[in-house]
């Protein structure tokens, strides 16, 4: 069976056979989780999509939750780190929130399998997605300290905003909203945070240059032998 390389397998193609097999399983997990959600996904379906033996899965992962956490943690870590790096010179908390929200939604729309996986797995595995909420909380607290956000910041508020952003992402993925989805939800959230309406609208709809996000960011390992085609891997 000839497989199309997914992002994880592409990043791991110069690594050893075991690393490449693990990457194939992770790409397969993204496909299955995006389609079926965490509850509906199964190890049998993941290994079928990855085209590996059932026993091979357990060489690399303990169970379905373990591979879901591994995939989610890799995506979330790389995504939040790169968005944060793109905002290195941006100190204004309101502008940071709007940029990060719009960047996140457009990135996930560009890789819809990853977008749907985030949406369908976040409710079941909140800890794996905690870094996203941590970054959001940090920027909201920054805005409070800057005197730009009058609203008190607490865990309930952060959860509510995260739910609003993911709802906007879902609309974008379904085609119910276009590229304006990030601006629309940014303006709604900023208004909810009691930012003056004029300021909320100006920041949310200001033209920005969204960055190209490169995921997954995996360490490059020098191959110890010629790398065989993935289709020839048996484990």
Image (cartoon, grey):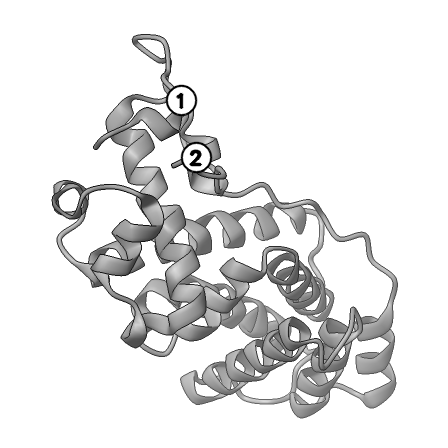
- The CA distance from mark 2 to mark 1 is 9 Å
First in residue order: circle 2 vs circle 1: 2
In the depicted structure, whether residue 154 falls above or below residue 19: below
The quadrant of the rendering that contains the C terminus is: top left
Viewer-closest of 43 and 138? 43
Q: Name the residue under label 2.
A: 2
Residue 11 visible in this rendered orientation of the protein: yes
Q: As drawn, is 210 to the left or to the right of 170?
A: right
Task: Classify mark 2: residues with Cα within 10 Å, few (<14), some (14-19) or many (20+).
Answer: few
Viewer-closest of 57 and 89? 57
Q: Where is residue 12 in the image (x, y as percent from the top left)?
A: 40, 30
User: Residue at horizontal 68%, vertical 74%?
Assistant: 172
Q: Mark 1 points at which residue?
A: 229
In the depicted structure, whether residue 227 falls above or below residue 118: above
Q: Where is residue 226 in the image (x, y as percent from the top left)?
A: 36, 9
Residue farthest toward the front in the current orientation of the protein: 1
Task: Classify mark 1: residues with Cα within 10 Å, few (<14), some (14-19) or many (20+).
Answer: few
């Amino acid at each position: 069976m000839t497989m199309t390389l997914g992002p994880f397998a592409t990043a791991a193609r110069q690594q050893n056979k075991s690393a490449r097999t693990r990457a194939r399983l992770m790409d397969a997990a993204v496909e299955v989780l995006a389609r079926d959600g965490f509850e509906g996904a199964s190890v049998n379906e993941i290994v079928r999509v990855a085209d590996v033996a059932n026993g091979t899965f357990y060489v690399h992962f303990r169970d379905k939750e373990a591979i879901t956490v591994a995939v989610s943690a890799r995506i979330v870590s790389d995504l939040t780190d790169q968005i944060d790096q793109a905002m290195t010179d941006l100190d204004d908390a309101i502008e940071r929130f709007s940029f990060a929200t719009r960047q996140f939604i457009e990135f996930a729309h560009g890789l819809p399998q990853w977008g749907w996986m985030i949406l369908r797995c976040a409710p079941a595995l909140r800890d794996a997605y905690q870094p996203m909420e941590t970054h959001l909380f940090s920027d909201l607290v920054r805005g409070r300290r800057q005197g730009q956000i009058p609203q008190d910041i607490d865990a309930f508020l952060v959860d509510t905003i995260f739910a609003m952003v993911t709802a906007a992402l879902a609309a974008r993925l379904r085609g119910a909203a276009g590229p304006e989805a990030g601006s629309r939800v940014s303006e709604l959230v900023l208004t909810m945070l009691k930012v003056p309406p004029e300021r909320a609208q100006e920041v949310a709809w200001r033209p920005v240059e969204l960055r190209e996000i490169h995921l997954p960011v995996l360490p490059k390992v020098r191959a110890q032998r010629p790398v065989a085609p993935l289709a020839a891997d048996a484990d």
